[in-house]
Amino acid sequence: MSHVPGMIQSIERSSAVLRLLAAGPDRLRVKEIADALGLPKSTAHSILRTLEHVGFVEQDPRTARYRLGRGLLDLGSAGMDANELRGRALNWADALAARSGEEVRLGVLDDNRVLVVHHVFRPDDSAQSLDTGVRLPLHATALGKVLLAYSAPAEESAVAAGLDPYTRRTLIDRRELADALTETRTRGWGLSVEEWRPGVAGIAAPVRTSGGLVVGAVGIAGPVERLTDTRRQARPALVEHVVAAARSISRDVAG
Amino acid sequence: MSYVLAVDQGTTSTRCILFDRRATVVAVERAEHPQSYPRPGWVEHDAARIWRDLQRLIRKVLRGVDPSQVAAIGIANQRETTVLWDRSTGVPVAPAIVWQDTRTDVSTLDAEFLKSRTGLPPATYFSATKIQWLLDRTPGLRERAERGDVLFGTMDSWLIWNLTGGALHVTDVTNASRTMLMNLTDLDWDPELLDLFGVPRAMLPEIRSSSEVYGTAGAVLPGVPIAAAIGDQQAALFGQTCFEPGEAKCTYGTGGFLLMNTGTTPVRSSHGLITTVGYRIGDRPPVFALEGSIAIAGSLVQWMRDGLGLIGTASEIETLARTVEDNGGCYIVPAFSGLFAPYWHSEARGVIVGLTSYITKAHLARAVLEATGWQTRDVVDAMNADSGLALTALNVDGGMTADNLLMQIVADFLQVPVVRPMVAETVSLGAAYAAGLAVGYWSDQRDLRANRHRAGSWKPGLDSGRRAGEYANWRRAVECAVMFSRDGQDGLR
């Protein structure tokens, strides 16, 4: 296979593997793919394993032959299945609630909103109800700021839809929001202090799948005085818990 | 800082979890062990491998923690799985026969006699016929067992024996209650049952409570008290702190296990449920439980994924089911290998009924989840009837509790709140609690209750008229499953 300088060879080869699998209805063996592309069998195998990991090819467990994967069909629909995400996050979200003493939410981007896909109660046995399925504003919550920070199109469309004020602290200026999102990306976690509801603060961090793609955000929410110090800065111990939980979920999601 | 170490020796894996005083998970280590299927219906484990796994897991989970910081170790285990080993060498004399193994024959056993003595119906699950099978088929084994040179144990006994370097041969009363050799009235080995199955008493462990210091561990955990042994489903009941009569938990996995605390006297079921020991703390009176199982729960979702290819991952069932408002009139009865409690019809086979051209795969997905909901309702109704207690809330755990729609369906169908606790590892937590109680790490059961926090709860929402109508349809669907079997003309008993 010829290789153009300045291009990444393994991506060229992977593309060729996908075209080969797409070309015919038959499922192919590793050797057939290696032979067709003039690759060593071990190289073809590594490429197929990687493509399988990201969901672009699938291997029939009985015949060991490869075909195109469902991941290619889903390319257009962003992110991962919300219920799948919840299943992976369940244990980590519980541990986050237990360690932080605050309620935990897992959110994904959905039509200019944060869609809450999982909610764990604050561990104090007060009356609480599940708000899975509830939609929260993107620009005014920690979860939303994290989701916006890693998606330029989402930021653009949120700004276009108008930055509604919820409190006097809500970021309603697009430049102020852009600065806050840059800060979120730089430190790797998001904070909102009384920007949505008076008296309430939130800390959140991104959940990433393989390749670093952000598929959701996990965070805690609670009274300002518990989540932040007197200078309204997030308490470092809580940030550590949130970031660690997000990392654990990411490891699980990325497989 | 001190901790309690819990071991969850399960069917597919062994887990070690370190808990702190607030019942928070501090560290987890897990190892899967192979399942061996040497012939159709046979399922075996390598008990020596499981013991090696446990030693490695203990060392890993204690990284950075000195054994002196471990207040106690507690063991929860897969129930009924049968290990026979040589007392002098400590080597198993045969592969362990797993509870799922169906090689033994129970067709000639007297069901009424066994139920009255043990609370158990004749089934291949329980240890007695597995021991009998090994003793009958291995030359010289029964003689060695009679001399006490070969010992029997469920996984709890096997691991405690190894942890103490062969010094202790004990089991707890919950595990003993699943052997089909223990008399439920005096909680001791029953001479008539031993005679019936040809099991020498010399090979049996001493029956102790679920929560007491049996002894101290040797090399792997020098000086740490071994303070609990309890069957895994009972451990989940204990971990969920279902300490009052009428409190129940359901663990949703490939199947479902529902246990209800019935207090200090055993309740004999007239609806085909199992009467079992729930737990016993030291020399206090034993607490009994009724147990009902849902044979097919998560495995129906797996079938939809692998058998029908309608979904890519198990979690997508919820996404698909949520695209429609209701089941469209479609019902699935997953009687893949017959109907269990409370129907007990082994010839019944699964059916999908109510099909019209309107039905899509989304309606099927909904019917799949509803089948788990109705099966739970069937078991709960039987328990309420047997115990005379009315379930007021269902505590849930297990992988399927991630499915919010399923949990809402269960709440709707049972008409009681469904509650998910903060610590999902209820089996391990139950073992930790039982061990911690025995050494005073936690002072009493009220102390344990204080650790319990709700992570989520679902309130019943369906209006009663619609629920009644749907339930009537489910019962008709169940009748179809019976009618379709060869002897279905007889209908439901």
Image (cartoon, coloured by chain):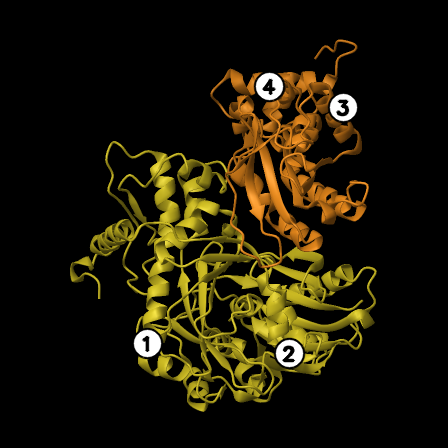
A81 vs B475, left or right, is: right
Spatial CA distance of label 3 from label 2 is 71 Å
For the N terminus of chain B, the quadrant is bottom right
Q: Tell me the residue that label 1 is attached to.
A: B108
Pair 3/2: label in front: 3
| Chain for colour orange | A
Q: Is the residue at mark 2 from the same chain as the one at mark 1?
A: yes
Pair 4/1: label in front: 4
Q: In this view, does B49 lie above or below A47?
A: below
Q: Nearer the viewer, residue B139 or B74?
A: B74
Q: Are marks 3 and 1 in contact (CB under 8 Å)?
A: no
Mark number displayed over residue A157: 4
Q: Single out the residue that lies furthest toward the front.
A: A168
Q: Where in the figure is residue B127, as x and y percent of width and height?
A: 48, 74
Q: Is residue B92 among the parts visible in the rendering? A: no
- Give the residue type that dot 1 points to: Thr
Residue depicted at x 36% and y 49%: B370
Chain B: colour as depicted: yellow
Please tell me whether mark 1 sits on a helix, a strand or a loop: loop
Please tell me whether mark 4 sits on a helix, a strand or a loop: helix
Spatial CA distance of label 4 from label 3 is 17 Å
Q: Which of B484 and A152 is in front in this view?
A: A152
Q: Where in the figure is residue A29, as x and y percent of width and height?
A: 57, 28
- Give the residue type that dot 2 points to: Asp
